[in-house]
Amino acid sequence: MSILLSKESRLVVQGFTGGTGTFHSKQCIEYGSNIVAGQTPGKGGTVHLDRPVFNTVSEAVRQAGANVSLVFVPAAFAADAILEAADAGVALVICITEGIPVLDMARVKRALDASARSGTRVRMVGPNCPGVITPGECKAGIMPGYIHKPGRIGIVSRSGTLTYEAVHQTSQQGLGQSTVVGIGGDPIAGSNFTDILELFEGDPATEAVVMIGEIGGSAEEEAARFHRERMSKPVFAFIAGRSAPPGRRMGHAGAIIEGGSGTHASKVKALREAGVTVVENLSEIGATVAKALKQKASV
Amino acid sequence: MKLLEYESKTLFQAHRIPVPPSGGVIRTMAQLPAALRRAGKGPWVIKAQVLAGGRGKAGGIKLARTPAEAKEAAKSILGMTLVTHQTHGQGLKVREVLVECGAKIEREIYLSVVMDRKACGPTIIASAEGGMEIERLAAEKPEAILRQPVDPSTGLPDFAARRLAFQLRLPPERVAQFCHLVKSLVWLFLEHDCSLVEVNPLVLTPKGLLALDGKVVTDDNALFRHPDLAKRRDPELSVLEREAQKADLSYIALDGTIGCMVNGAGLAMGTMDTIALAGGKPANFLDVGGAADEERVTKAFQIILKDPKVKAVLVNIFGGIVKCDMIASGILAALKKVQLRVPLVVRLQGTNVEKGRELLSQAKVKIVSAEDLWDAAKKAVEVSR
């Protein structure tokens, strides 16, 4: 078991024929992901990477049976691409694109929420994220596949390369990962920590969760509350940006301390009070998890 | 991007949000008399144009009743280095001064539209207790703050605007003007892809409502649909930050001694944190990007080394899709082009890491190789001393 992606996932790639889309689709196919179709408006009817290309996502869903969309469409058009995927009826949209205007995402989020209220739930992950991978089964994103190992740790993260760090360390410790989810570094994201923690809590294959947060916003504080009230599995957190100055955007649009809120200290405090193990040293994430699980097993 | 007060007020005017009569911005004392004439009858207010709150308390805003007083005020403000509670101990040089007519203030109101991450959309924040900094108000009197979420597609409906006016206890004859004003403010926010539009204070005068101060922050991600803003020189950036921006590198200058070059924003922050944990201080944040090729690495080295405080450089790269041997050759090629004046510590991890490390060990320049990030941070702190 795993969350979000499995061997059954049938992927359509939006922005399939572009440079980025082509490069990363190839990598996903090599990893063994089941990409069943691509979409590029105007290129319908052609074949790319041995897969059919459609003008619209709804054709990819109806004719190729796609149920997950992976979006590589440029920032200016990405919000529309997400809405198209949701409209076409895929269950999950994973958006890799970086630099989508925040207002566009606000509109997308509202549309997805409205459709969920009327009974059609479309889950979205991203934007500005490395994607999602269930090791050994399906990779939908830009992460290096080989550092992952099938295993028992769920990882959820706001940052790309920090995720790789956590993956690498848990692989080296022999723990492996059930599923790794990059929720992205933007102020408004399709899924937040609590959405993914809820899935990991319900996944029998996940024994513990590593959560990589950063300064800005209040998603980590909300995750802390969720952990205290609704979770039985242990969570280990690292929060980046302890040494970041307030008021400056640290690369990610969402990583900014504004008006005294979203600080490293407030997040660490909330998480610790909720029983989450906060790891201070980035290099010790894997070792900390391994030690804690070993102790738990011996009790 | 943060806009200065006078730039924000130009946007206000374009959206018919009333602002005080203005004489415009001056950059030299010679421009003052004309500015006073343009503003009209005194008294005047002379205001430093810098990106920080708390200007008044720090001596950056002065009232002048006569042209002589105005001259004295402008002279003291123009060119001064302003340190306020928001400048984090650093001073901001005042290069521009706004000249405006003073207003008769009956009441002060706080009004803003902000991108609310939790509500996933814009939210109006208002308070009948204006003039105060909103963070302080939120801490001391949270019940005095009104919140009104806004639909990002349709803007603010009339009834919600009216409700706000009544909640703010505005006199009945000002309700219509307020509704128009707050709706315009929302449109300004939506049209210009803002993350914050703030009027603090919005004042009630005998002649009606007036935006006495203005602050606008726009979303950098949306610059592609605002060519005017994209062309604007961001006054907040330092010389090195501007150079980095041109090279498409995400760089922020800090006050430590260890220069950092990292791929990925999160890992860059994590690297800074690890340096701090090891007892050092990072000199910068720098995300060299996923494609850490020769050109980008060269440019990144050049920018980091221009900072005279830098005593050591730490390169931390997780080679995923871009393999470590490629990154190592990029670093080696870059080192042929830049004069390395300080020790260099490199930590590579990921695909083909062995090959990458071997390449680095053959370099002519001495490179301190590190096993993991903690090892790298400790070594960087050591060699920087």
Image (cartoon, helix red, strand yellow):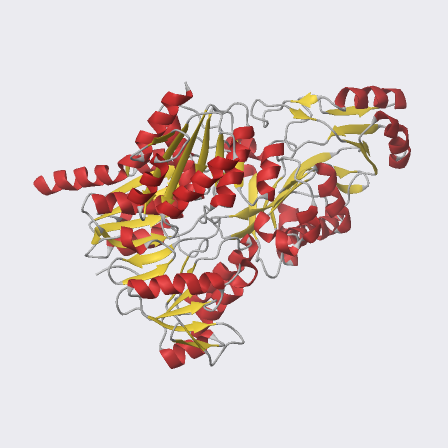
The x and y percentages for residue A266 are 40, 34
The residue closer to the viewer here, B129 or B254, is B254
Residue at position x 89%, y 24% from top?
A: B67
The quarter of the displayed image where residue A143 is located: bottom left
* Residue B264 vertical placement versus B340 (above, below): below
The residue closer to the viewer here, A276 or B272, is B272
The x and y percentages for residue B298 are 51, 39
Determine if residue A258 is in view.
no
Determine if residue B25 is in view.
yes
The x and y percentages for residue B75 are 80, 21
The residue closer to the viewer here, B291 or B273, is B291
The x and y percentages for residue B167 are 62, 45
Compared across the picture, whether B295 is left or right of B182 comes to: left
* Residue B21 vertical placement versus A46 (above, below): above
The quarter of the displayed image where residue A210 is located: top left
* Residue A226 vertical placement versus A73 (above, below): above
Compared across the picture, whether B36 is left or right of A259 comes to: right
* Residue B71 vertical placement versus A111 (above, below): above
